Image (tube, grey):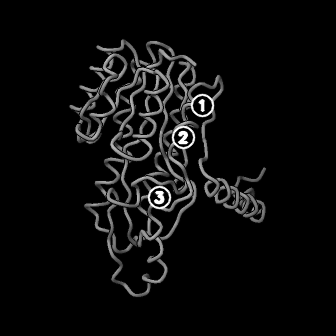
Amino acid sequence: MNKNKVWIITGCSTGFGRELAKATIEAGYNVVVTARNMSAIADLVSGNTDNVLAMELDVTKPEQIESTVKATIEKFGRIDVLVNNAGIGYFSSIEEAVEEEVRKMFEINFWGLMHMTNAVLPYMRSQRSGHIINISSIGGLVSFPGVGYYNGTKYAVEGISESLSKEVEPFNIHVTIIEPSNFRTDWSGRSAGKTTSAIKEYQELIAPFISGENHGNEPGDPKKAAEAIISVIEMEEPPLRLLLGSDAYHLSVNKYTKTLNNFEKWKEVSVNADFQD
C-alpha cells in the first residue's frame, strides 16, 4: 500500500464520502476532504493536519473546484486519486418531475463530476499516473420507476467514464465506476429531492420507490464499501466497473442476461440492416 498517495474526495459530509474519508485518513494516506459545509468535516481534520486538508467545495462552483485543486497541489505536490462522490437523488415519475430540480441534479451528478475530473486531469497526465473513481449507482445500469431522471444522470456518468478510460489509458490513468445498490447512506433521506405523485395512474407503481420507508434499513454497509474502494486503488489492474452489494450483483446479472437473450432473439433483424453484397 502506497501511503504517499494523495486523494481528493468530494461530498465528505455524509454517506460514502464520509466513510471513505475516515478510512483513508486512518490508513495514513494524504487526503483532501471536501464538503459544502465545512463544519460537517471539521472533525476529520482534527489532529491530522499533516496529512489531511479540508476544503469548502460545491462542485457546481468552478471557483471552488479551482481553489481545491490548487490547494491540494500546494500542500501535497500531486494528485493520485479523485473520488467523485458528491451527488443527490430525486424521486418522481418522469411525467411529473420539476425541471428545475432535475437540472439541479444533473449539474451536481454529471457536470460537477466532469468539472472536477477535467480540473485534475492535467496534473495526472503530467505525472503519468492517477486513478479517477466515479461513484455511479446500480441505477446507472438498471432503471427503476420513480427515479428515471436520476437514472439518466448515472447512465451519463457510466457512458462518459467508459470513454474517458480509453482516452487516459496511454497516460497510466485508471478510471473505475463504482455501482452500489442500497446502502445505509443519506441518499434517499435528507439529500434526496421528491415530487409526490398526483396522477393516480402512477401512484401505486411509484409509491414504493418514493416513500423512503426502507431508509435506514438498507443491506449495504458503507464502511465495507470504503474498504472495497481502497482495495481497488491498490490494484495493479483495477476494474472499469465494480458492483457493490448483493442487490447490485443480482440485478445487473439478471438485466444483462435478458439483454443478451434479446440481442440473440433479434439478431437476424439486426445484421440484415447492413448493405448486402
For disc 2, the marked residue is 177
Number of the label disc, if any, that sits on residue 151: 3
Dot 1 amino acid type: Ser
Find residue 117 and report its horizontal and vertical position in percent. 40, 32
Camera-side residue of 124 and 212 = 212
**258 with respect to 132 (left or right):** right
* Residues at marks 3 and 2 touching, judged by CB atoms closer than 8 Å: no
51 versus 144 height, above or below:
above
Q: Residue at x 51, y 51 (%)?
A: 137
How many residues crowd mark 2 within 10 Å: few (<14), some (14–19), many (20+)?
Answer: many
Count up the numbered dots: 3
Camera-side residue of 158 and 246 = 246
Within the image, what quadrant is residue 79 found in? top left
Of labels 1 and 3, earlier in sequence is 3
Find residue 98 and report its horizontal and vertical position in percent. 28, 67
* Residues at marks 1 and 2 touching, judged by CB atoms closer than 8 Å: no
